């Protein structure tokens, strides 16, 4: 029963990041995906200067001014996720499917042309758009020397066992109660019941929830040349994360411990607001220019989490009694970065169009803020100075580029395609993964005077690095490569 690594000291704020709000939370809730109608997704979300699609309100509310008739529509999105995990040369594959409402809304259009003051139409928009999907199930496994149990042991350094459940209920307390770590009175340290052999790691990570936004918008068409609009966004966030981390000793000589499983479960809910302002200008009939600004969203969050642990020993399984399973709760706020979007579109007569959107997202502007103390949360407010400095240190301003094209291949039948390049948010000095997220999309649409039906397919390719603990050790890294296949069906009618 010797400690696996003498002097192995890991800061709990870095290695067990799920117990505190940090820069990764700012990033998670500040970035969005390309969700919308089938027409919108088929063109990779490139719609800032085209408009006349309800999903365009999330890019530029002025583009809703292109509607000359009232319309209502709904869209369903079916996502198929394929994950490939590479952990110390061991590859693990996993899949996940998700059906969700992508958009739902109505645009009420009013004819103003009879007033002869240049204003042609105005619109009031009520809509819902799903902005991001967190749902996924990922698995990795493989052999490694380092162990999560050393992190759990080191987190309790200097804390007497009689107080360990008061000060470290989510980490060392669980490991001590399941006899996976022991206390040394002389050194004042906890040490893990591990040998000098490797461990076999297996972790299953399940995520759920998403980001959705309710839009209340107003827009106008002036002389078919200038369009302007604004929308209030009510943003709702739900994020679930749970994982089971299991390690099995490959060498059990001299210790009773055979394996352990550490479990974590978190639910986060948030509500916030933002404002979008936009204009669209047509210098000539073939060219459209758009510009939009999105204010930061101020979102109030509440996290609830719990942890648990079991350990298998030579004489049986040790577990935590249900009444001693620790539960945590914390409220805070996040200010997401501001966004600026520029768009240009070229119209091919009555046959088609091409649109290019460039979005600037100032990620270093994201910030964590304290929430007022509640009855269940006492003590001084935490200032998040360290975490907010890490936001500035790690993240950079990114420019997301989306290109979409639409062409009428037959009467009332349209062919669409799109491409998007979404750079990674990390600064080069961080040394994190550099491969950008890529989106390829296409679709078909049919419409007449009263109804329209669209279908699209979109492929999103993402790369990410995941550290179960101690990101200073490259051996702890898991590389996830994910392909997300989206199929969207939209039905709408005009009135």
Image (tube, grey):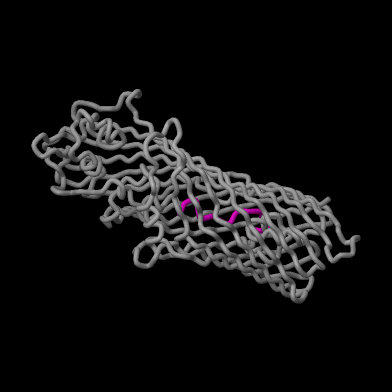
- Report whether 86 appears left or right of 349: left
* Residue depicted at 71% across the width and 70% down the height: 353
As for residue 336 lying within the magenta part, the answer is no
Above/below status of 120 relative to 347: above
Instruction: Tell me which corner region of the image, top left, top right, bottom left or bottom right, holds residue 69.
Output: bottom right
Can you give x and y, in whole percent of width and height, for residue 106 in the image? 74, 48
Q: Residue 9, how many percent across, how many down?
A: 20, 48
Residue drawn at x 73%, y 49% as measured from the top left: 73
Q: Left of 419 or right of it: where is 96?
A: left
Q: Is residue 277 above or below residue 75?
A: below
Which residue is at the front of the view, 98 or 382?
A: 382
- Residue 260 vertical placement versus 337 (above, below): above
Residue nearest the observer in this picture, 360 or 86 = 360
The residue at the point 15 percent across, 34 percent down is: 183
What x and y, as percent, mark residue 446?
A: 76, 58
Can residue 239 be seen at all in this image of the molecule?
yes
Measuring 42% from the left and 57% from the top, which residue is drawn there?
A: 481
Q: Please state the horizontal and vertical placement of residue 31, each as a whole percent of the image.
A: 51, 55
Residue 77 appears anywhere in the view: no
Span shown in magenta: 27-40
């Amino acid at each position: 029963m010797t400690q696996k690594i003498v002097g192995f000291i890991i800061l709990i704020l870095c290695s067990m990041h799920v117990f505190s709000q940090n820069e990764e939370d700012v990033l998670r809730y500040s970035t969005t995906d390309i969700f919308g109608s089938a027409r919108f997704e088929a063109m990779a979300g490139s719609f800032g200067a085209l408009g006349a699609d309800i999903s365009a309100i999330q890019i530029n509310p002025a583009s809703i001014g292109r509607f000359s008739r009232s319309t209502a529509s709904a869209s369903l999105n079916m996502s198929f996720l394929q994950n490939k995990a590479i952990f110390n040369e061991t590859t693990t594959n996993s899949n996940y499917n998700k059906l969700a409402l992508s958009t739902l809304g109505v645009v009420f259009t009013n004819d103003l042309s009879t007033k002869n003051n240049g204003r042609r139409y105005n619109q009031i928009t009520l809509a819902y758009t799903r902005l991001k999907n967190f749902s996924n199930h990922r698995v990795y496994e493989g052999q490694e020397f380092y162990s999560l149990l050393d992190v759990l042991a080191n987190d309790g350094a200097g804390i007497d066992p009689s107080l360990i459940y008061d000060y470290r209920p989510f980490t060392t307390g669980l490991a001590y109660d399941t006899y996976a770590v022991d206390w040394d009175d002389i050194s004042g340290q906890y040490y893990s019941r591990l040998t000098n052999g490797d461990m076999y790691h297996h972790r299953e990570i399940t995520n759920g929830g998403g980001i959705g936004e309710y839009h209340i918008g107003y827009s106008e068409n002036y002389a078919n040349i200038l369009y302007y609009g604004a929308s209030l966004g009510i943003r709702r966030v739900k994020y679930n994360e749970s994982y089971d981390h299991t390690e099995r000793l490959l060498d059990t000589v001299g210790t009773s411990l055979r394996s352990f499983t550490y479990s974590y479960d978190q639910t986060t809910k948030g509500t916030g607001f933002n404002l979008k302002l936009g204009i669209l200008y047509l210098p000539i009939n073939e060219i459209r220019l758009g510009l939009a600004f999105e204010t930061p969203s101020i979102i109030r969050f509440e996290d609830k989490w719990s942890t648990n642990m079991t350990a298998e020993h030579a004489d049986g399984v040790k577990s935590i009694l249900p009444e001693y399973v620790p539960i945590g709760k914390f409220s805070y706020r996040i200010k997401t970065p501001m966004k600026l979007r520029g768009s240009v579109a070229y119209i091919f007569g009555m046959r088609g169009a091409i649109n290019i959107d460039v979005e600037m997202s100032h990620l270093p502007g994201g910030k964590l803020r304290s929430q007022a103390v509640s009855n269940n949360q006492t003590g001084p407010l935490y200032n998040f100075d360290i975490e907010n400095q890490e936001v500035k240190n790690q993240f950079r301003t990114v420019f997301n580029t989306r290109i979409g094209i639409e062409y009428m291949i037959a009467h009332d039948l349209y062919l669409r395609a799109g491409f998007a390049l979404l750079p990674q948010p990390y600064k080069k000095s961080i040394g994190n993964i550099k491969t950008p997220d890529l989106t390829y999309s296409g679709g078909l649409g049919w419409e007449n005077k009263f109804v329209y039906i669209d279908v699209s397919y979109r492929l999103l390719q993402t790369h990410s690095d995941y550290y179960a603990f101690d990101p200073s050790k490259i051996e702890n890294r898991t590389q996830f490569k994910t392909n997300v296949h989206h199929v969207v069906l939209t039905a709408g009618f005009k009135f």
